[in-house]
Image: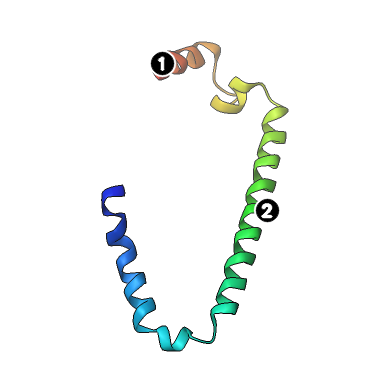
């Protein structure tokens, strides 16, 4: 997929070049929206990670990863397959 990365960005780049006259006076707004959305994304991601860490911290690791309804023999079978 990395070999074709330029292919995926090509349509977006061509669109920017063809619509450059429309975007000429709006670069400040585009930059502001990009920065705000980046900060919001980082914040939400951080809060989500903290929530998941706290909720998994209350359970044993095996119960959190494999579910509480599995027996210890089922967990050992799953652990053996993953190695």
Q: Is residue 11 left or right of residue 38?
A: left
The residue labelled by disc 1 is 83
Q: Residue at 69% across / 25% down in the picture? A: 59
Q: Residue at 55% across / 75% down in the picture? A: 30
Q: Residue at 66% across / 38% down in the picture? A: 52
Number of numbered discs on residues: 2
Residue 13 position (above or below residue 46): below
Is the residue marked by circle 1 packed among few (<14), some (14-19), or many (20+) residues within 10 Å?
Answer: few
| Residue 73 visible in the snapshot | yes
Give the quarter of the figure containing the C terminus: top left
Q: CA distance from mark 2 to mark 1?
A: 35 Å
Q: Residue at 46% across / 16% down in the picture? A: 79
Report the front residue among 17 and 76.
Answer: 17
Residue 59 position (above or below residue 25): above
Residue 4 falls in image quadrant: bottom left
Report the front residue among 44 and 63.
Answer: 44
Identify the mark at residue 56; answer none if there is no mark.
none
Residue 9 falls in image quadrant: bottom left
Instruction: For mark 1, give the secondary structure.
Output: loop
| Residue 77 spot, x, y in % from top left | 44, 14
| Residue 37 spot, x, y in % from top left | 61, 64
Instruction: For mark 2, give the secondary structure.
Output: helix
| Residue 1 visible in the snapshot | no
The residue labelled by disc 2 is 43
């Amino acid at each position: 997929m990395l070999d074709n990365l330029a292919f995926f960005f090509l349509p977006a780049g061509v669109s920017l070049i063809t619509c450059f006259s429309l975007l000429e006076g709006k670069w400040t707004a585009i930059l502001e929206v990009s920065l705000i959305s980046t900060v919001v994304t980082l914040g939400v991601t951080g809060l989500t990670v903290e929530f998941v860490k706290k909720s998994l911290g209350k359970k044993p690791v095996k119960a959190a990863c494999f579910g509480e309804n599995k027996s210890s023999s089922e967990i050992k079978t799953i652990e053996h397959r993953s190695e």
